Amino acid sequence: MTELEPSSPFALAGDPLALDAETMRALGHRTVDALVDLLTDPGRPCLRRATPQEMEQRLPAAVPEAARDFDELLDQLRTDVFPWMSRLDHPGYFAFIPACGTFPSALGDFLASALNPYVGTWMEAAGPSRLELVVLEWFKRWIGYPASAAGVLVSGGSAANMTALACAREALLGPMTESAVAYVSDQAHSSVARAARLLGFRPDQVRIVAAAAATRQLRPEELAEAIDTDLAAGRQPLFVSAAAGTTNTGAIDPLPELAAVCRERGVWLHVDAAYGGFAALTERGRAALHGIEQADSVTLDPHKWLYQPFECGSLLVRDGRLLRHAFEIAPDYLRDAVAEEEQEVNFADRGLQLSRGSRALKVWLSMSFFGAAAFRAAIDRCLDLAAMAEDHVRATPELELMSPASLGIICFRRRADGGEDEDEVARRNAALVAAFERTGDGLVSSTRLQGRYAVRLCVMNHTSGEQHVRGVLDWFARADVPAVPTAQARRRRSPRSGALHDHAWLASRPFSPAELAALPLFASLDAGGLERVAAWAPEQRVPAGQAVTHRWDAARDFYVVIEGRAVAERDGRVVAEFRPGDFFGELAALDWGAGYGYARLATVTAVEPLRLLVLAPAHLGQLMAEAPAVDEIVRSAVRHRLAQATR
């Protein structure tokens, strides 16, 4: 490469990383041309997959010691990188949570990267810091927060949810204790569980509360009972995470009622509105999100329904002082940057990141370029398309509506043929999802609703129109179902290192393999499987009249009845009876996410003296991973009992 004149008056002569102004312009023009060609190419499929081996061949890890021509590098990216990714701006992209950006917002990221401002302190970035305050002020107004609220832009909803939980803990508790308890719906985003685990909440300190089967909403009366039970036991209810647009179905929890429950008990209410919060720009969105303004904190993701490129999330806290109190640290080496006036904001004092760039620039630039009315119209059109999709499914005999349109999400599936069980329906629809991906015309994803397989359609892209939505639904109604095996063995999962041990040498085994083989749950196990269960399972004896489990209890053991009889009671009525060969406790024992399980949904009491086989959650999980028949029996019970408990 020839030696170039420095691009900056401050660059040293002979700077090996400097470019002259004309070269920078030329490279920038060629890059923009390549980008526009990619963005306007109608032939690029919605998704192209590649194996790790294929990508390793295309992109070896050798360090490039010598310089390469920029056009050659662009060509390699066009050939070996950009084709092998999802196309999030595709009008047929309806999977997961789409993230369709705009070109002005991408240019905002380009400006932020080139100028590289440090937006941790006001001293070093008064302009970019003010821009972030302006953007956060917009967000506050849209959800009805007071002027005293404060916020911060972060990488996404996961970081925002963790920041909210940390802020709540510092505000209400201080250092972590063993008595603190957090509460989430079973429809909550998995990032809430991850945040709890990383912040030191043990498995018995998070309550997974089953949402209502019909609405997928967190029920205020269930939450109140769970909190009151913990208060009576001397625990400290700390944090409730509600949803304003669940990832599964777009459900919005009853926010005013949940706010009242939390306010009466001194519990922090957080609303995860990462997906649905920006619906507040529209009239019907504001109505649907009524009560969000009462939350103590709110997560919003501009890289979802505000059409910003990754990464851009945000957290707002109603009492803004608490955010700074939770995170502000001023070591000696940062004393020069301490804010001198109240109006000076050091965003490093509002979250986890000290090193942070400008995420506000792209939001401000795109919003100012198009105007809020354009974003409002795009969101409104998505709401219309989701409602139209629901009507289309209802009018199509081949399709079954699994969850009505809520915000931009609708769940459906190909209707079962006569005599098909749930597993066959799931296999058939999973095959259709995979086949649709192979068309290149679009992408959908799947989920489970009360254990039942559902195809999930999320309408968020401003590029999607009515023809694209109807096209997907018609394809699922008419497509031939690919051949699928009649049974699918689940992939074996290895337990965490050190998690499982065979303690058979410590004591005699209370159950013989022959005794276990006579139980319906274990009848399909081979000799090795029976030996493992015999080695894992201790015996528990419970006299008549004594409770085995209590509703809302955090213990997670799984029980099989060997002798005797027990009943499950909920709200003063018997909801199930267990006799020899039956089992209970599977909902609590199974991993909902990050090592947390459901709180007990009922109290189980011995009617006759009980002899029980007990399995720890880790052992049950390994058994289900290795024995498909056991897995099917347990998951069938989960579907039935969860539906029964949440009616």
Image (tube, rainbow, N blue to C red):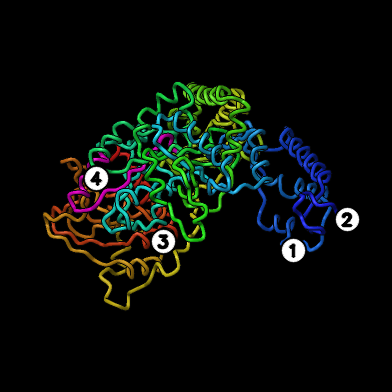
The residue positioned 56% from the left and 34% from the top of the image is 94
Q: Could you give the CA–CA distance between mark 1 and mark 2, rounded to whole angstroms?
A: 24 Å
Using a 10 Å C-alpha cutoff, classify the residue at mark 3 as few (fewer than 14 neighbours), some (14 to 19) or many (20 or more): some
Which circle, 1 or 2, is nearer the viewer? 2
Which circle, 2 or 3, is nearer the viewer? 2
Q: Which residue is mark 2?
A: 2
What type is the residue that disc 1 sits on?
Ala
Q: Earlier in the sequence, mark 4 or mark 1?
A: 1
Q: In this orientation, which residue lies closer to the viewer: 570 or 309?
A: 309
Q: Earlier in the sequence, mark 4 or mark 3?
A: 4
Q: Could you give the CA–CA distance between mark 4 and mark 3, rounded to whole angstroms?
A: 32 Å
Q: Earlier in the sequence, mark 3 or mark 1?
A: 1
Q: Secondary structure at mark 1?
A: loop
In the image, is 415 to the left or to the right of 640? right
Which circle, 3 or 1, is nearer the viewer? 1
**Residue 418: percent from the left, percent from the top?**
44, 33
Q: Earlier in the sequence, mark 1 or mark 2?
A: 2
Q: Could you give the CA–CA distance between mark 3 and mark 1, rounded to whole angstroms?
A: 40 Å
Residue range in magenta is 222-246
The residue positioned 80% from the left and 52% from the top of the image is 6
User: Is 187 situated above or below 509?
Assistant: above
Q: Could you give the CA–CA distance between mark 4 and mark 1, rounded to whole angstroms?
A: 56 Å
Q: Could you give the CA–CA distance between mark 2 and mark 3, rounded to whole angstroms?
A: 61 Å
Q: Which residue is mark 1?
A: 62
Residue 622: mark in rendering: 3
Which circle, 2 or 4, is nearer the viewer? 2
Using a 10 Å C-alpha cutoff, classify the residue at mark 2 as few (fewer than 14 neighbours), some (14 to 19) or many (20 or more): few
In the image, is 262 to the left or to the right of 248? left
Q: In this orientation, which residue lies closer to the viewer: 176 or 147?
A: 147
Residue 227: mark in rendering: 4
Q: Could you give the CA–CA distance between mark 2 and mark 4, rounded to whole angstroms?
A: 70 Å
